[in-house]
Image: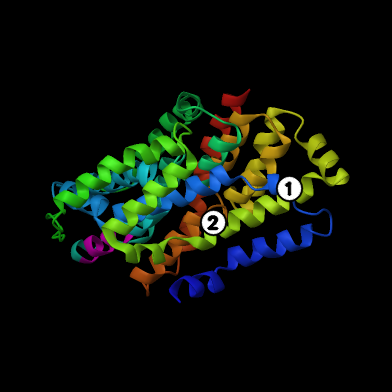
């Protein structure tokens, strides 16, 4: 019932389903429209992430680091670095779901104003997730669609990662070096056998995501791991996201067979700069995951599209699902302090988008 309830309440899924339904007017869907490798990889990744969440790996690491902070700036820098790294391997959503509630505990103990820290945690999650193929859904899709190797991805992400870290470091300087007492954070005990089993099985699962192992084997191992650790985690997988991907694949497949749409997009995406700017812009309106799925069939400018949809997650609240998630977490943990969140969020994101957007422009030139 929990799974059904989540699907029924998933507005993004229903929007995608509506778009897919309307696209049927243009063309009939074909089996080749569905990228099962991407869907299987996403399902396997979500299974592994649920296991990592269950074992409290990120929150335990955060508790250890934060206990060593001597002032407010160092504390926030540690949180931002942890969010950035966590997003690289556990996705931006998981980092936000872990770090924001953790910060809420700290903020209440140390009386830290929460708006700017949560906005920057959100920013760190988005920027950290662009670094690896498993950091966010659009990267996973691009990895599979363009059949990229890990080395290809490192080349794509490397330069912008350095500037992203520079940007985060600059924003962190807004916090004063006010002395703080070490916050008291509960650390759970890590289960030894389950932890080692997770580490051992995660390796072949990641190999499958990178295309070095059969998708079926990868998915089977992920499900086995999930069931062994806790079968109830099956209910926590975001099936709505998987269905959303299927809907977008159907819609894009149908649209790509429409002569007018194909001609229009071919004309629009006639250069790397055009792909970059278009993906940046469309991401602001429909978010970066559907933007990647929509534009990929019409462009071979991988770097431009990669930078466009990843940096496109900055800007508006709907540019990335992680932005909405962070805002929801903020409202949940700081119910009476939401008055200027959107203002500060927009300011920080637009400045960050302008800075990294210009860098991205010169990287593709």
Q: Secondary structure at mark 2?
A: helix
Q: Which residues are magenta?
A: 100-108
Q: In the picture provided, is 210 more to the left or to the right than 282?
A: left
Q: Is residue 166 above or below residue 248?
A: above
List x then y, in percent, for residue 265: 79, 40
Q: Secondary structure at mark 1?
A: helix
Q: Which residue sits at x=28%, y=57%?
A: 228
Residues marked 2 and 1 touching at CB (< 8 Å): no
Q: Which residue sits at x=47%, y=26%?
A: 159
List x then y, in percent, for residue 146: 60, 32
Q: Which mark is residue 8?
A: none
Protein image colouring: rainbow
Q: Quadrant of residue 306?
A: top right
Q: Nearer the viewer, residue 27 or 320?
A: 27
Q: Please identify the residue farthest to the right as the structure is shown.
A: 260
Instruction: Check disc 1 and report the residue beneath it.
Output: 253
Q: Is residue 1 above or below residue 39?
A: below
Q: Quadrant of residue 209?
A: top left
Quadrant in which the N terminus appears: bottom left
The answer to whether residue 303 is visible is yes
Disc 1 residue crowd, few under 14, some 14–19, many 20+, Cα 10 Å: many
List x then y, in percent, for residue 325: 45, 61
Q: Is residue 284 one of those drawn in magenta?
A: no
Instruction: Check disc 2 and report the residue beneath it.
Output: 242
List x then y, in percent, for residue 348: 47, 49
Provide the major secondary structure of the magenta segment.
helix
Q: Nearer the viewer, residue 231 or 331?
A: 231
């Amino acid at each position: 019932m929990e799974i059904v309830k989540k699907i029924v309440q998933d507005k993004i899924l229903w929007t995608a389903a509506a778009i897919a339904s309307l696209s049927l007017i243009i063309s009939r869907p074909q089996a080749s429209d569905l990228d099962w490798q991407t869907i299987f990889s996403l399902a396997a990744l979500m299974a592994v992430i649920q296991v990592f969440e269950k074992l409290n790996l990120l929150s335990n690491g955060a508790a250890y680091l934060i206990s060593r902070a001597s002032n407010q700036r160092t504390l926030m820098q540690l949180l931002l670095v942890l969010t950035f790294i966590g997003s690289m391997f556990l996705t931006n959503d998981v980092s936000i779901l872990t770090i924001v509630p953790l910060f809420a505990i700290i903020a209440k103990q140390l009386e830290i104003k929460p708006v700017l820290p949560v906005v920057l945690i959100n920013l760190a999650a988005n920027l950290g997730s662009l670094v690896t193929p498993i950091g966010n859904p659009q990267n996973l899709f691009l990895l599979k669609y363009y059949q990229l190797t890990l080395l290809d991805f490192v080349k794509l992400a490397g330069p912008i990662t350095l500037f992203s870290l520079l940007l985060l470091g600059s924003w962190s300087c807004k916090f004063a070096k006010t002395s703080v007492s070490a916050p008291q954070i509960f650390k759970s005990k890590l289960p030894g056998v389950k932890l080692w089993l997770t580490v051992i099985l995660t390796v072949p699962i990641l190999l499958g995501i990178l295309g070095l192992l059969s998708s079926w084997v990868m998915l089977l191992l992920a499900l086995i791991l999930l069931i062994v650790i806790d079968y109830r985690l099956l209910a926590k997988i975001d099936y709505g996201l998987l269905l959303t991907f299927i809907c977008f694949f159907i819609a894009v497949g149908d649209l790509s067979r429409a002569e007018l749409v194909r001609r229009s997009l071919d004309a629009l995406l006639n250069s790397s700069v055009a792909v970059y700017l278009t993906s940046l812009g469309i991401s602001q309106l429909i978010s970066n995951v559907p933007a990647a799925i929509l534009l990929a069939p019409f462009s071979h400018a991988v770097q431009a599209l990669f930078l466009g949809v990843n940096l496109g997650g900055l800007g508006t609240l709907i540019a990335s699902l992680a932005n909405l998630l962070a805002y929801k977490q903020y409202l949940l943990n700081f119910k009476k302090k939401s008055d200027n969140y959107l203002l500060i969020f927009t300011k920080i994101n637009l400045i960050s988008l302008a800075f990294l957007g210009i860098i991205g422009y010169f990287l593709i030139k």
